[in-house]
Amino acid sequence: MKNNTIMTPEEKKLLQAKHRLEEAQMRDRAKERKARTRRLIQEGAILEKIYPKAVTMDLDELEEALLCWFQS
């Protein structure tokens, strides 16, 4: 309610529909973030399994090693 005006039933329904849509979009974004996080964790685990030295490297060293490996 803006400026103490009374909303019509149609306005209330429209506002509720807008909020439901926003909530659905937030749920979708949260699902996408969780899926990405899970994928990144799984990929990191595979990398560490295949290349155990990755555990002791900092990110710059790891990136350089991977770039060298993929460019050869």
Image: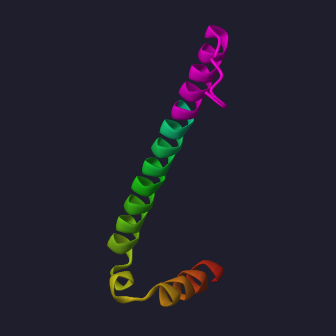
Question: Residue 45: x and y, percent?
Answer: 35, 66
Range of residues picked out in magenta: 1-23
At a point 53% along the width and 44% down the height, the residue shown is 29
Question: Chief secondary structure of the magenta span?
Answer: helix
Residue toward you, 39 or 22: 22
4 left or right of 51?
Answer: right
Question: Residue 41: x and y, percent?
Answer: 38, 62
At a point 63% along the width and 17% down the height, the residue shown is 7
Question: Residue 49: x and y, percent?
Answer: 32, 71
At a point 43% along the width and 88% down the height, the residue shown is 58
Question: Residue 37: x and y, percent?
Answer: 43, 56
What is the quadrant of residue 10 in the picture?
top right
30 left or right of 16?
Answer: left
Considering every residue shown, the one lying at the far front of the view is: 4
What is the quadrant of residue 68 in the picture?
bottom right
39 left or right of 20?
Answer: left
State how the image is colored. rainbow
**Number of numbered discs on residues:** 0
Q: Is residue 12 above or below residue 37?
A: above
Q: Is residue 56 magenta?
A: no
Considering every residue shown, the one lying at the far top of the view is: 9
Q: Is residue 15 magenta?
A: yes
At a point 47% along the width and 84% down the height, the residue shown is 59
Residue toward you, 2 or 32: 2
Residue toward you, 56 or 3: 3
Image quarter in which the C terminus is found: bottom right
Image quarter in which the N terminus is found: top right
